[in-house]
Image (cartoon, rainbow, N blue to C red):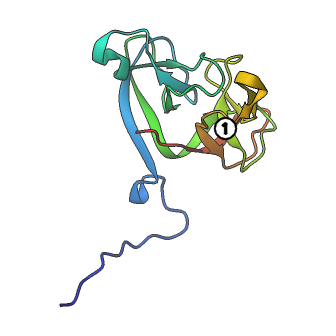
Amino acid sequence: MATSTLVQFISAGEKASTSNRSQEETFLAGGAIAAGDWVALDVSQTGANKALYVKETTAAAGSAVVCGVALVAAATGAQVRVCIGGFCKTASVVNTTAAGSPLMTSGATPGMAIAATYVASGGGITALPIPCGVALTTAGVSNTAEVWVTSRF
């Protein structure tokens, strides 16, 4: 019995939404969020709201609750669209981060990612923190870059 294969036509210059190159979810803002900020699940909420609310990343570097990049600015309590996986055109990344660098969040700068580095853990062992994405372009003086968001869902 013959089988058929579904083939999708894509070509250079297609949009990020083509063939799900970018995945988005809508959350509620647990605080003021700027477009391009890396956001994390708001674990200060109660019950299932921990998976409904997000806020700018402020946790320790490489936090596991980082879930993506805010695509729009949002005030506290407002809906915010978040790229939770795939291509994101504008994300906050510390300037001079090179294209191809794995990214992690920085507790020092809310909402911003930096090039991932090994960090000391128990007994002097070093480990690479959980990456939140990869820089696809070198971040410029505007502290933004195109990124690939690592899907955690």
* Left or right: 61 in relation to 71: right
Q: Residue at x 45, y 70 (%)?
A: 10
Among all residues in the image, which is located at the extreme bottom? 1
Viewer can see residue 143: no
Q: Nearer the viewer, residue 32 or 99?
A: 99
Measured as percent of width and height from the top left, residue 56 is found at 55, 19
* Left or right: 83 in relation to 62: left
Which image quarter holds the C terminus? top left
Instruction: Tell me the amino acid under the disc marked 1.
Output: Leu
* Total count of labels: 1
Among all residues in the image, which is located at the extreme front? 123
Please rate how many residues cluster around mark 1, counting C-alpha atoms within 10 Å: few if below 14, some from 14 to 19, many from 20.
many
Residue 141 lies, with reference to residue 34, above or below; the image says below
Q: Residue at x 46, y 48 (%)?
A: 22
Q: Secondary structure at mark 1?
A: strand
Q: Nearer the viewer, residue 109 or 14?
A: 109
Measured as percent of width and height from the top left, residue 119 is found at 74, 28
Query: Dividing the picture into quarters, in which one does residue 110 lie?
Result: top right
Q: According to the image, label 1 marks what residue?
A: 103
Among all residues in the image, which is located at the extreme left? 1
Measured as percent of width and height from the top left, residue 122 is found at 70, 22
* Left or right: 89 in relation to 9: right
